[in-house]
Each structure stands twice: as structure tokens, then as C-alpha cells.
Amino acid sequence: MKIKHNFGNRPKCIECKADCQFMGTYRKDGSPTFRKLCANCHGKAIAKKRGLKNIIHVLAKNKGVSVKKYVRDT
């Protein structure tokens, strides 16, 4: 289950205008850091950079298995 922290106003994704992804870190002043993209757009960008369809293909390739086996095992 994904946890969505309540930070008040989150920045919006530059691609789709959804809430940006929290990176899990904080600045020295205590404010949270966010990506410029939401989780979905970030996954698409990573896959595109590697010449693959989507983030599932990237994860399966990193694990060294087929997409079908990766999806079945997760």
C-alpha cells in the first residue's frame, strides 16, 4: 500500500498536473523535497530513457526475467 503524506499543498507534475512524488528526503530547513513529476510520469520517463514500454518492463529487465514472470511473481 502506498502512503501519501499530508504535506498540505504539493507541487503539481509538469506533465499531467497531478501531485508530485515525495522523494523521501527533507531540506535543511525541514521542508520536504518533491520530484518535478508524479510517480506515473516518472516511471514513463525512466522507461522511455531505456527504450522500453513502461516501468514494469524496466523492473523485469533489471531482475533478469520476462515481464510475464515478473508480474506473476510480484
Image (cartoon, helix red, strand yellow):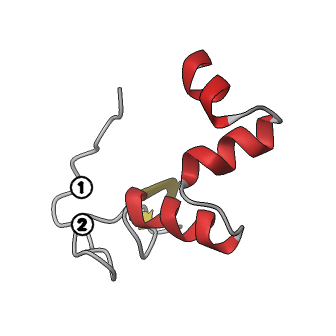
Residue 54 horizontal/vertical position (percent):
53, 56
Amino acid, disc 1: Phe
Q: Quarter of the image holding residue 70?
A: top right
User: Which part of the image, by quadrant, shows the C terminus?
Assistant: top right
Q: Nearer the viewer, mark 1 or mark 2?
A: 2
Front-most of 34 and 62? 62
- Residue 19, by quadrant, is bottom left
**Quarter placement of the N terminus:** top left
Q: Are marks 1 and 2 in contact (CB under 8 Å)?
A: yes
39 relative to 47 in the view: left or right: left
| Residue under pointer 2 | 10
Residue 57 percent across, percent down from the top left = 63, 48
| Local secondary structure at mark 2 | loop
Q: Residue, x 61% and y 29% (percent of image)? A: 68
**Along the horizontal axis of the image, is 28 left or right of 30?**
right
Residue 41 position, x and y percent, is 41, 66
Taking the spot 33% from the left edge, 65% from the top edge, the residue there is: 20
Residue 51's disc number: none
Residue at the spot x=66%, y=24% of the render?
Answer: 69
Residue indicated by mark 1: 7
Give the amino acid type for the residue marked by disc 2 in the picture.
Arg
How far from the left and from the top, in percent, is residue 46?
Answer: 61, 65
Q: Does 54 appear above or below 68?
A: below
Crowding at mark 2 (Cα within 10 Å: few <14, some 14-19, many 20+): some
Query: Marks 1 and 2, how far apart in space?
Result: 7 Å
Secondary structure category for the residue under label 1? loop
Q: Nearer the viewer, residue 46 or 61?
A: 61
